[in-house]
Image (spheres, rainbow, N blue to C red):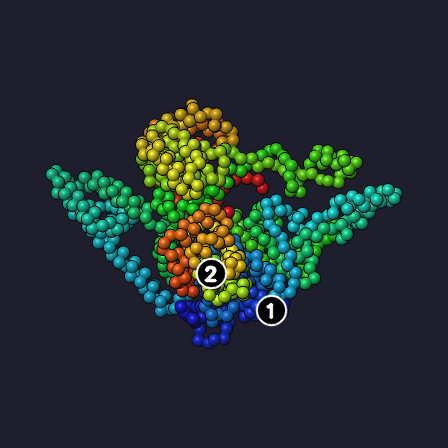
Amino acid sequence: MNPDLPSPDPPSSDLPTPDFARQLQENLIRFVRVLRHLGLPVNPAETLDALAAIELVDLGRRTEVQAALRATLVKAGNQMPLFDRAFDLFFARPEDRQARVAERRRARETRRKRLAEAGTELIFQGQPLELTPEQIEAYTRLGESQRERLRDFLAESSAGNKVDRKFQPLIESIVRGHLDRLRREMDGERRPETASTGDESLDTVIDGLLRAAGENPADRLLHLDMKDIAEVDLPRATTLIRRLARRLATRLSRRYRESHKRRRPDMRRTIRSNIRHGGVLFDLRFRERKVSRPRLLLICDVSGSMARYTAFILEFIFGLRQAVRGVEAFIFSEELERVTEFVARPGPSTPDARRTDAARQVVEGSRVWGKGTDLGAALDALLAEHSRRLTRDTVVIIVSDTKTLGADKAARILARLKPKVREILWLNTLPRVDWAEHRTVALFGRTVNMHECYTLAHLERVIRLGVGRRFRPG
Amino acid sequence: MRPSEATTEWLKTALEGDGYIADQDIIISIYLALRLAKPLLVEGAPGVGKTEIAKVLARVFETDLIRLQGYEGLDENKALYEWDYQKQLLRIQILREAGLAAEESDLFSEEYLLERPLLRAIRAERCPVLLIDEVDKCDPEFEAFLFEVLSDFTVSVPELGTIQARQIPMVVLTSNSERELSDGLRRRCVYLFIDFPSIEKELRIVRSRVPEASEKLAADVARVVARVRELDLRKQPSIAETLDWTRALLALGAEKVDDALLAETATLLLKNRDDVTILREAAGSSDGFVSEALERGLGQVGGPAGVRGPGPTK
C-alpha cells in the first residue's frame, strides 16, 4: 500500500500549492473517467462532491482518501469491490504504473506479431487468404492442434487434383465460416471488450480491472451467458427475474377504489359516511386507481438448440411463479406441454429442495425436452386447447432463440395470437449481432416485442428499458 | 460542538463514548455528510446498525431525533404538514352558531397547522437529526418529493408563505434495498454501506453493549456468530441478535459456548424455521462446529468472503 499522497506524481512540497490542487483535480477527473468506463454511473455533481470531500480529509492517509471517495462516488453496495480495485490500481506507485503500461505495450506488440505471422500461415497455393483481422485473431487464439488441422486442410486443397486459383474464393469462405464459428464459441467465454478511452494510462487501469473482474464472481455474473450461470449464482438471477415479474405484473386500471392516500376525494363515499355527522363533511374519503395484475403466460423453448439454457429457463419459471401468482407455464419443442402443475406442486419443506425437486420432475417427466423446434405447432396447440387462458389481461412471454421449423406458419399463428392478448414479449437468447443472419428474428419481430436476453445484464436492461412500464402507476 | 465543526477524531471518540463502535468508513462518511451538509444514505443488511447511526448522532450532538418511518402510501400530508381539517370545521360551526363569519386567515393559521416530521425538522430551533427510515419502502413519487425537500430545505405552504430552514438538519436515510432507489436521490447523498462486522469489531460491540459478559464469553460469541453467518442461511444473524444471544447466554449462566448450547439457543440468533434447522444440523454434526469457529483469528470478516451486495431482504 502506498502511504504517499494519492497522486501519481506527488509534488516535493507537503504544502498544498495551487499547482498541486490543480493536479489533484485532474487526477480525480481521470479517476472518474476510469470509473465511468467500468460502468459506475458517476455524474458531475458527485465529482464535485468528491473534490469537496478530499479537501476535508487528510491527504496523507490513503485509507481516508479512499473512504471519502467511496462515500461520494459509489452509491451501491455491490459496486464497492470494483471501486476498491480501481482505486488500488489507479492510485498506485508511479513505478508500478510504469511497469503496467510497459507490460501492456509489450502484450499489444506480441499480439500484432502473432497476427502478422498467422497471416502468412493461412495461404492457398502460395497466396494469402483474404480474411478480416478478427478472423485471423480467432486463428491465433486456437489451440495448436486445431491450427494444424486448418493448415493441413489448406495444404491438401492447394495440392489437390485439378485445383487452381479459381477455387480460392470457395476455400476462403469455408475457412471464414469455420473461424467465425470458432470465434463466436470462444467469445462466449470472454467478457465484451470495452471501448478505449484514448488515454494509455487510463486504458491500462481499465484493462487490469477487467482482467481482475474475470476473477470476481459478483461482477462476472452479470455478463456471463446464462447457460453458464452456476447454481450458486441463481439467487441473483432470481432477484432480477422477480423484478421483471413485478414490473410486468402491475398495471394501472381505469377504475377507482377507496384509498388511504389523500389525493383524490371520493365525494360519494364522503357524503355517505358523513350523514351521521348531520351532513357536515367531517370525515373525508379518498379514492385512487386500482393497480390490477395481468396474468402471465410463459412459453419456454426447451428444444435441442436451447438445451444449454435449461437452468435459466427453469429459474425463470420458478422466479416468476414466486413473484406473481397465477403464472401459466408451458414448455415446447415439437409440441406444447403445460408444466404449471409441476412447478406449483407442494413438496419437500425447504424452498430450495422443493425447487430442485420440481425442476427434476419437469425435466424427467417431459416428453418435449431436447427435441426439435416447431413453434407453429406449439402455438396452434395453445390456441386450440388453452384459449380460455388467453385474455386481454394476459402477457405472453416467449423464451426462445427463434430457430424453428415452419417459421412462416409460426409467424402467421403468432399474428393470430397477438390480438387475443395484451402483449407478447420475446426474450431471445440469440446474440443481437447474429439476428441479421436469422430470417426468423425479423419475421417474429414484426409481431412481438423482442429483446436480446442471454445474460443477466440483458435481463436487467430489459427491465430498465421499461418493459411493461406503461402499465405502472405514476 | 456544532455538527459542521466536528472532526474525524472527535466523532470517533464521541461515537465510541456512546457505545457505537464505528470503523473508519462509517466515521469518514458521517464526517463528510456533516461537513458537506448533505444527507447520509445508509444501506446494509437488517440489523447492522443503520438506524442506530441517527440515534447516536442525536445523542452526541445533544439534539432532537425526528423520525419519519417510510412505508408504502406515505405521502406529503403525512410527511410534511396537513391542515387540521376537523378542527377548522368545528371552528366554522362555532362561529356560525355565534352568528359570525369565519375569516380565511383565522382558519389557516399556526393553530390549525399539523406539523409532520419534515416540517418539524425544518422549523426546529436546534439543528435536529432527521431520520428517514426505510426510504426504500416509500413510493417512487414520494422519493421525488423527498429529494426536492432535501436539496433546499424550503417548504412553501400556500396559506402561510415560504418557510426556510434555520439550519440544515443532519439527515440520515436508511434503506434495505427492497427497491432500487432513484439515481437522483443517491446523487444528493453521501453513501455508506455497512457490512456485517469483523469478529474483532463485533467483539468490541458486545463488550460495549453487554459489559456484564466476560471477555471469554464475548470472544466466543463473536467468533461463533461469524461462523454462523457463513452458513447458507436465508437471513444472517444481525448485531442486535448477537446481543440478544449474549444476554440469553448470560441468563443461562454460561461461561463459554459449545455445540449443545448453540443448538439449544439457536432460536435467539435465527428467526426462521429453516435457518434454525440448518444451524442445528451443523452444530449436531460431529465436526465440532463451535470448536472450529473458536480456533479462528480475530481479523476475519464475518459472513461469506467478499462484500455482499445489498440484496433484497425478506
The residue carrying mark 1 is B5
Instruction: Mark yes or no: residue B136 visible.
Output: yes
Residue at 53%, 35% (x, y): give it. A293
Q: Chain of mark 2?
A: B
Q: Tell me where residue A349 appears, x and y as whole percent.
A: 44, 41
Instruction: Pinpoint residue A45: horizontal percent, then vertical percent.
Output: 53, 58
Residue A123 placement (x, y as % from top left) = 19, 47
Instruction: Classify mark 1: helix, strand or loop.
Output: helix
Cα separation between marks 2 and 1: 38 Å
- The verdict on a common chain for dots 2 and 1 is yes
Q: Along the horizontal axis of the image, is B117 left or right of B291?
A: right
Q: Residues within 10 Å of mark 1 (few under 14, many from 20)?
A: few
Give the answer, above or below, for where A215 lies relative to B204. Answer: above
The residue furthest top is A384
Which residue shows up at 56% across the image and 48% down it?
B137
Q: Chain of mark 1?
A: B
Res B221 label? 2
Q: Amino acid at mark 1?
A: Glu
Q: Residues within 10 Å of mark 2 (few under 14, many from 20)?
A: many
Mark found first going from the N terminus, 2 or 1: 1
Q: Amino acid at mark 2?
A: Val
Viewer-nearest residue: B260 or A151:
B260
Query: In the image as oriented, which residue stretches furthest toward the front?
Result: B253
Residue A195 or residue B255, whichever sits in front: B255
Residue A191 falls left or right of residue B2: left
